[in-house]
Image: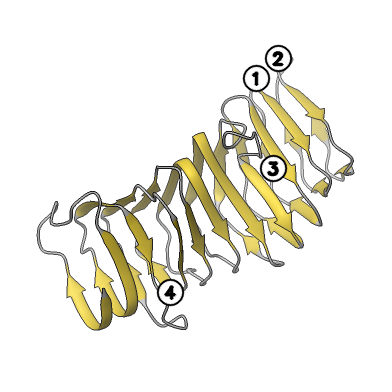
Amino acid sequence: SITGGMLVDKVSGQFSSTSNLAINGGEFNLSGKTESIGNLSGSSGGSAILALGSGTLTTSQSSTTAFDGTITGTGTLAMQGTGELNLTGSSSAFTGKVNLSNGTINASANTATGTGTFTVSNLGNLQVQGGVTLSNNFNVSNTGGATNNGAIENVSGTNTISGTVTVSGSSRIQSDSGTLTVSGTTALGGNTLNVGGGGNTTFAAAITGTSASSLTKDGSGTLSKIGRAHV
């Protein structure tokens, strides 16, 4: 547990893959190294910093935790496992990648996941809620977790995905309640995107694809296409 000052990682592999990294104050500076941990957490009122540099931090996330600090750097935050990581702080200085291959990341602050590329695959599930805007460019190739709750899931509120969405495999976007707006271009390629749930989903920009791609809808919510569809 870090409560103040700065802890700098000088050599990769210093953490056990089951260890819990709690940044409750100060800064953890990965300094471009590579580490795998069991869980990431932190309660600091937003003052704590996770500085990735150009490094990679992988969390297996076996339980539900929250990190309310700031993530910075050009590196990679990777999540796998069956738990949930709640990101409640703004991380506009994080321009690196997020790779979510299993479990859930819940974003409830503007730019909680930075501004870089966010990849959702396998049984990964990104949840958004609280009236936030995420400016990442997304690459999705799955239907969500074990309950098919969406690679991207609007839990509640009016939220916006302002970057592009690239569908690189059969995928699902789900809105449980409220409205999710995708304001960047959605590129289906030759894949299927299923949109569903009891909430609303709006595509405000172009939807592109090929003769092999399709956009399907289920659930009681409303699907609105304001931008042109080239499918």
**Tag 3's secondary structure?**
loop
Tell me the quadrant of the picture where the C terminus can be found.
top right
Q: Nearer the viewer, mark 1 or mark 4?
A: 4
Going by the image, does 12 lie left or right of 210?
Answer: left
The amino acid type found where label 1 is placed reads Gly
**Residue 185 numbered tag:** 3
The amino acid type found where label 3 is placed reads Thr
Residue where numbered disc 4 is placed = 69
Could you tell me if the residues under marks 3 and 2 are in contact, i.e. CB atoms within 8 Å? no
Could you tell me if the residues under marks 3 and 4 are in contact, i.e. CB atoms within 8 Å? no
Residue where numbered disc 2 is placed = 212
Residue where numbered disc 1 is placed = 190
**Tag 2's secondary structure?**
loop
Q: Nearer the viewer, residue 82 or 33?
A: 82
The amino acid type found where label 2 is placed reads Ala
Characterize the local packing of mark 4: few (<14), some (14-19) or many (20 or more) Cα atoms within 10 angstroms.
Answer: many
**Tag 1's secondary structure?**
loop
- Up the image or down, 120 lies above or below 133; here it is above
Disc 3 to disc 4, how far (Cα)?
A: 30 Å
Disc 1 to disc 4, how far (Cα)?
A: 39 Å
**Residue 203 numbered tag:** none
Residue 134 percent location from the top left of the image: 61, 59
Going by the image, does 89 lie left or right of 218?
Answer: left
Q: Residue at x 40, y 67 (%)?
A: 71
Q: Earlier in the sequence, mark 3 or mark 4?
A: 4
